[in-house]
Amino acid sequence: MAERSFKKEVQDLRAGEGEIFRGEGILAITKALLQSGVSYVGGYQGSPISHLMDVLADANELLDELDVHFESSASEAAAAAMLSASVMYPLRGAVTWKSTAGTNVASDALTNLASGGVTGGTLIILGEDFGEGSSIPQERSHAFAMKSQMWLLDPRPNLESLVNCVEQGFELSESSNTPVMMQVRIRACHVHGEFVAKDNRAPDFKLRDALQSPRRDINRVVLPPASLAQDVEKLEERYPAAIRHIRENKLNEVFGPDNGDVGIVVQGGLYNSLMRALLYLGLADAYGETSIPIYVMNVTYPMVDDEVVEFCRDKRAVIMVEEGHPNYIEQSLISVLHRHELTTRVHGKDMLSMGGDYTASVVEKGLRNFFEKHASDRLGNRPPAPDPVPILTSEPVKKLADTVPPRPAGFCTGCPERPIFAAMKLTEKDIGQHHVSGDIGCHIFANLPPFNVSGNTMGYGLSGAGASAFNVKSDKRTISVMGDGGFWHNGLTSSIGNAVFNEHDGVIIIVDNHYAAATGGQDILSSRADNPRRSTQHSIATAVKGMGVKWVRQIDRTYDVAKMQATLTEALTTEETGPKVIIASSECMLNKQRRVKPQFRAAVKAGKRMVKERFGVDEDVCTGDHACIRLSGCPSLSVKQTDDPLKDDPVAAIDNTCVGCGNCGEVSEAAVLCPSFYRADVIHNPTRWDRLVARMRSAVIGTLQGLADSRRVAFPD
Amino acid sequence: MNALADHLTGAPVLDKPISIAILAMGGQGGGVLSDWIVSIAESQGWAAQSTSVPGVAQRTGATIYYVEMMPLHGGKRPVFSLMPTPGDVDIVLAAEFMEAGRAILRGLVNPEQTVLITSNHRSYAVVEKQVPGNGAGDSMTVVKAAGIAAKKTISFDMQDVAERAGTVVSAALFGALCGAEVLPFGREVFETAVREGGKGVDASLRAFAQAHDMAKGDQPVPALKKDTEKSLPLMPETVGHRRLDALLQRVRAEFPAPLHPMIYAGMKRLVDYQDVPYADEYLDRLAALHTRDVACGGEAQGYAFTEMAAKYLAVGMAYDDVIRVADLKTRASRFRRVQDEVGVSEEQILYTTEYMHPRMEEITGFLPARLGRAIETRPGLYKALDRVLNRGRRVRTGTVFWFGTLYVLGGMRRMRRLGLRHGREMAHIEAWLKTALDQLSDDYALATETLRSRRLVKGYSDTHSRGLSKFDRVLAQVPRLSGLPGAAGWLALMNKAALMDEEGSALDGAIKSLDAELGA
C-alpha cells in the first residue's frame, strides 16, 4: 500500500472510552478487534473487507503499542492456518477475507482448525459478497459453518451491533473451544454510522509468551484416533457449551410484543430490510417499534432449539426471513418444531424469493402474503406500499430500457492492461482466435466490450490449470491470463508448476501491474515499492524460471503494443515445447497517478522543469469510424458530435482526464488506424534554453504558416 | 415526505427517513458527495447513514450510493435501510444523464415524491462509442421519461459547471441539491460541510455556488441540445473575393434556393481541400446530376437527390490522403486549437507529436499515376520499398524539420490531381453516381438512398478498406433491389446495418433477409 495513506482512519482507531466513533462498518469492526484484546490479525484482501487490511497495514505504531501482530497473508489458506496459534494458547486471533471465494480457499485449514478446536478465541470475519454488486458466484458461507461445526454470527447491520458481535464472538469461541465466523454483507461493510468506543486493550497473554513456553497436545492433532475423539467432543462438549453461551449472553434478540399469534424469525443481517418492510405495511415505526414479535438470529448457526421453540410455542405461524439458498435455517426450524411437536406453520422461501437480495420490497411482498394468510386483520389501515410498477410500465420509461447503456466496471483510464488486450485482438486478426483461459483480477474486464476476449474462470491463480486439458497436439495453443496477485496466491504452483510438470504447450500471460490492483493496490511479493515492513521486489520471471519454465519473456512497458503483439505471436508459433510465459509488466495507473500526481504538482510549484503529456484527436482528421475505441475502451477516449454538416457520425475525442499513457497512439500506430492522434507535451517551467529554441522554432513555423494563410483562398468560417 | 412541506416552519415531522440515492460512475466523487450529505445531517443533530457498493478500484462502472437521514426520537436512532426501495426515494442525484435514466429504470423516481437532480451531460459507455457509426443513446428519451416519472426535475450541465470551477461534478450536484431547497438545512450548513471536507475547497465552493443559483432559478439554464441537431450555415451573398463570389453566383444561378446551404457547405470544403477550380468541377458534376433530378420529377421530392449528392459528392471528392493530413496538421488554426484544448498558459511551452503510419499504398497513391502504377506492378520493388517506408512514425510538428516536411507535403496539393489515388477516387465516384442515376427514373427514393451509402466510406488504411468493402457490398445490392417494393427502405436498412459493427455481421444479416425476400 505504498500509494495510499490511511492515517486518518488509523487515528480513528485510537478512540478511547466514551468517545463517539463515526465511520464505516468495516472500520468499526477493526476497532472492535483492538478493543477485544486481539493478539494477531491476518487475512487476504478483497471486496468488501480490503479496508480492514489496508488500515491495519498502515497502523504499525498503534499495533506495536498494543502488541498486536498483523500479517498480510499470502492467501486465505495461509490466513486460516495462522489461527493455529490459538489452538494451544489463550491467544485471541482474527482473520478476514472475501467469502465464499476466500472460504473455499481456506477450507482445508478451517477443517483442521475446527476439528482440533481452539483455546484462544478465534474469529473469522467474512466479507459476504452476495447480492447486487457482488463479483463472485452466489453461494452461502452457512454451509461451511455446518459442515465443520463452526459457529456463524450474522449481526444486525449497525455499528453498535457489529462491534458487540466481535467482542461476543471471541467469548463464544473461547467458551465453546470453537472457531467462530462472523459474516458481514457488502453494504454493512460500507455503512456509515456511529458507536460509543471503548479503550483499546493489549492482550494479557502475548505471542511472545507462547514462544517462551511452548505447549503441545497430541489430542489436538488431526490424527486418528484423536480426530475421532475430536468429532465426539464437537458434538458432546463444544456444541452444548456454545448453546449455553448463546442463551446466557442473549446473543439473539427478541423485539416487539412478548406474545402474538404470528411472528417473524430473521437473520440479524436482514433486520433493517425487515423493519423497513414492516414500516411499509404499517406494522412498525421508523425507530423499530413494532407490533409483531420478531426473533433476530444474530447467531445463525447453531440454532438454539429452546429459544425458537419458546418463541414459536404460542404462534399459529411464523415466517423465516433467510437470504440465499438453500434455506438451511428454515429447514432446521421446521425440523426443530416438528421434534417438539409444535403445530406452528413455518413459512419462508414459499413466500419469499428463493435467491437474490432480500430488499425491503422483496421482504414486504413476502410478509404481505404471510399476513394475508395468517393475520389479515393486522393489515387494516396500512399506507399504500411503494409501487414503481405504474411508472416502470409506462411507454416513455419502457423506451429507456433500449437507450440506457449497461455500464459495468472496466479498466481505468490509462490502465496498462488495455494495450495487452489490444495486442491480443490484433494478434487474433493475424493468426486467428485462440482459446483463452481467464482468471480473477482486473484483467477479467477484457471479457467485456470492446475487447470481448472470452474466457472462463475457474478461480484465483487457476487460469493455467484451467487450460490444462487442452494439452494435445494442435496447431493452436491456449492462452491463459493471470494477474500478479493470482500468480503469487496460487498460480505459481497450480498453474505454472502444473504446466511445467505436465509439459503443457500453452501460453501463459502474467499481468504484472506491481500491486494486487483489483483489491485496492496492496503490495505483494513482486511489488516494486520499498515497503519497510514487507519484503518486496521479488521477480516473477525468476520464480517462473525456478519452476522450470524455459521460454520466458519479460515486457517492461505494456504500452508498446507492437512489441506485445510480436511477443504473443512468437509465443503462439515458436517451436519451443513446454509452457511459454510472458510477463507483461507496467504499473497500475490508478496507483501510479496517486503517487505521481502530487509529486508532479510539487515539482511544478518548486519551479522545476516538468513535462506533462496528454493525448488529443484532430477532429477534422478523424472520420468517426471509432476503430481506435474498439481497440481501447479507455474512459478518457470518447466521442463527440461535431458541427461539421458533412460529418454524419461523432468523432473521437479525448477529455482532460487523459493521463498520457500513450495507448491511443501506440494502438493507432500498430493497427495502422489513422493519423488523427497527437500527443501534446506541455513543458512547465521551461528553461531559458527551452524558451530560446521554442522562440526560434515558432518564428520559422509562424512565418511559414503566415505565408500559407495569405495564399489560401477559402470561404470564411 | 413531510419534510418537503414542513421545513419552512423549521420543524420537520417525519414518519420515515428522508432518502437520497446518488447515481454516479466510479471516479465522479459520489463517495465524497454522500459524505457531505451525511455530515450536513449530523451537524444538525440528525442521525444519518450512507451505504454503497463500490468496486474497490475500478473507475468506470455505474454505482449507487444511498443516504438516509432522520432526527432522533427521544434519543432513539431510527432503523435505516441499507438500500433504496423502488417507489420510495425522496431525492435522486444523478451525475450523468443516462444514470438519471438508470435511476428511473430502477424505479427510484416516482411522481408523488421524487425530486430528480441530474447533470444532463453525456459520458458515453463503451457500447455506445465503439459503434462504427453513431451509437449514442438519445438524451431525449431521458427527458421524456423524467417528465412523467419525477415530481420535479432539475437538470443542467453540471459537469460543465464543475469543469469551469476546476473540480468534479459532485460539488455541482451538492450545490444543486442545496439550491433545490428540498432538505431542511440552510446554505451555510452545506457550505460548512464542503469546507470541512478539506480538499480543493475553493474550487468546490465555486461550482457549488454556480450550481446552487442555477438550480434555484436565479441563473438561466441553457436548453439541452439534441444530439443530432446540426445547423447548416446559410450561403452568404458575397465574401468579397472575386473567384469565390463567382462560385456563389454560379450556385445561385444553377440551383434552387433550398439547396444552397448544403451546396455551400460542400463547395466550401472543396475550396479548402484543393482550390477554386476543384469546386467548379464539383458544381459541374452536381449540375449534371441536378438536370437529371429535374427531369425525373425531383421538384415534387424537394430535389432530395441533388441535396444528397451535394453532401456526399463533396465528401467523396475531399477524400482523406497524406496531403490532406499534412495540410491540416500544419495550419496555424490547428496549432491554436490544440493550445486551447490542452490549456497552455503563457509561461508554458507546447509541442505536439503526431502518430502516423503511412503504408506503401498511401505513397504510391500520391505519386504521379504512371510512376505509382509502375511500382505497383513490380511486387519485388513494392515490397522492398514497403519494408523501408511502412512503419509507425512519430512526427514532432513543433520542430522545424518535421514541420517543414509536412508543410512541403501539404503544399503538394497542387499536384494531387496527377496522382494515382486521385484517378482511382474519381473513377470510384463515377461508378457510384452511375449506380444511383440508373435507378433515378424508376425509383427516386432508391437512387437517393444509393447516394447515402457513400457514408460507409471513411477512415484511413485498414479501416478505409473495410469501409470500402462494406460500401461495395451494399452497392452491389442496388441492382437486386431495383423494382422491389420498398427498395429504398431495404437499402436504408443496409446502410444502417453496415455501421452497427466492425465485422459487418449486421450487414450480413440484412443481406440474408433480402435473399429470403427475393427467394434467392
Image (tube, coloured by chain):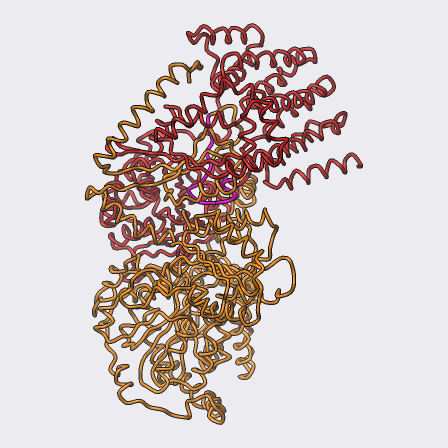
Q: Which region is colored magenta?
A: A628-643
Q: Which chain is red?
A: B
Q: Quadrant of residue B331?
A: top left
Q: Quadrant of residue A33?
A: bottom left
Q: Position of residue B226 (x, y in %)?
A: 48, 30
Q: Position of residue A124 (x, y in %)?
A: 39, 74
- Give the drawing colour for chain A: orange
A351 relative to A24 in the view: left or right: right
Q: Position of residue A654 (x, y in %)?
A: 41, 38
Please give the name of the residue rendered at 48% of the width and 47% of the height, measured from the top-left corner.
A562
Please give the name of the residue rendered at 56% of the width and 81% of the height, measured from the top-left corner.
A338
The answer to if A631 sits in the magenta stretch is yes
* Residue A149 visible in the snapshot: yes
B64 relative to A92 in the view: left or right: right
Q: Which quarter of the rendered picture does the C terminus of chain B lie within? A: top right
Q: Of residues A460 and A232, which is closer to you in this image? A: A460
Q: Of residues B385 and B447, which is closer to you in this image? A: B385
Q: Of residues A271 and B298, which is closer to you in this image? A: B298
Please give the name of the residue rendered at 36% of the width and 54% of the height, measured from the top-left corner.
B68
Q: Of residues A113 and A543, which is closer to you in this image? A: A543
* Residue A291 visible in the snapshot: no
Which residue is outermost to the right? Answer: B519
Q: How many marks?
A: 0
The answer to if A371 sits in the magenta stretch is no
Q: Position of residue B109 (x, y in %)?
A: 46, 45
